[in-house]
Amino acid sequence: MLDIAIHATGSTGNCYTVSNGKATVMLDCGLPYNRIQKLTGFILPDAVFVTHEHQDHVKAAKDFMKRGVDIYTSAGTAEVENLEGHLLHIMKNRQSVSIDGIVVSAFETQHDAVEPLGFLLDDGEDRLLYATDTYYLHYRFPGLTKIMVEANYCNEILTENLRYGKLPKTLERRLRESHFSLENLKKFFLANDLSKVKEIWLIHLSKGNADPVMFKREIEALTGKPVYVAGID
């Protein structure tokens, strides 16, 4: 079974861990190393998987490598961040690696980064999707049991914020071209078989452009599954 822990989510930093009881892998490390240590109870993961080069996802990668932790990411992310050494492992689209019983597979995402990735984790009992910072997901993922997925903004809220000058036009363009909207998230759920899904986590909500209560209500109504909003009580 894969146990999920949400340590930080959003534009100020992202960090999650997934454990099967033997190994713990970290998904993104976008906070200062010491902050991550406090949030995780001072554990060192067996590996860190980084989605892309933006600092709210990669900030502590070099610090983890200094402490002997393997980093898995794309060649594009590694190049931008100057990551190198024997602890760096380059992953390509649809490539998999096993971390003590957790098989992690990479897939392409659509974001304003050099070579962004999402990850699929499978321990034989659970099959977990981790997808963040992407405006769309082209793939279907059969057999999912748990989902951690970005729900960054809602078109209606975004339009309202633009109308009243609460959101710069330049930021609106970036959000629409690089982050997952509630509307596209719904399309993704409708395109996938959710019959085995046990829980859905909505992550990386945009402050001011999302409504956590409404997002939870609408995704639960659409999917019929338990939905949790990361960082929201």
Image: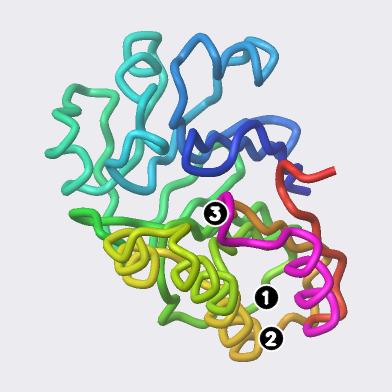
User: Of the residues under marks 1 and 2, which one precedes in the sequence?
Assistant: 1
Q: Is residue 196 left or right of residue 111?
A: right
Labelled pair 2, 3 in contact (Cβ < 8 Å): no
Q: Which residues are magenta?
A: 207-222
The answer to whether residue 214 is magenta is yes
Q: Amino acid at mark 3?
A: Ser
Around disc 1, counting alpha carbons within 10 Å, would you say few (fewer than 14), some (14 to 19), or many (20 or more)? some
Q: Residue at x 35, y 39 (%)?
A: 72
The answer to whether residue 73 is magenta is no
Give percent across and percent down for residue 148: 63, 57
Q: Is residue 141 visible?
A: no
Q: Which residue position holds label 2?
A: 193
Query: Which quadrant of the structure image shows residue 55?
Result: top left
Q: Is residue 176 left or right of residue 223?
A: left
Around disc 2, counting alpha carbons within 10 Å, would you say few (fewer than 14), some (14 to 19), or many (20 or more)? some
Mark 1 vs mark 2, foreground winner is: 2
**Residue 11 vertical position relative to residue 210 in the rendered view, above or below:** above
User: Of the residues under marks 2 and 3, which one precedes in the sequence?
Assistant: 2
Q: Which residue position holds label 3?
A: 206
Q: Nearer the viewer, residue 62 or 39?
A: 39
Q: Residue at x 43, y 64 (%)?
A: 179
**Residue 231 vertical position relative to residue 107 in the rendered view, above or below:** above
> Which disc, if any, is residue 120?
none
**Distance from Cα at disc 1 to Cα at disc 3:** 29 Å
Give percent across and percent down for residue 112: 25, 59
Give percent across and percent down for residue 111: 31, 62
Considering the whole magenta stretch, tell me its main secondary structure. Answer: helix
Q: Is residue 166 left or right of residue 154?
A: left
Give percent across and percent down for residue 109: 36, 66
**Distance from Cα at disc 2 to Cα at disc 3:** 27 Å
**Distance from Cα at disc 1 to Cα at disc 2:** 7 Å
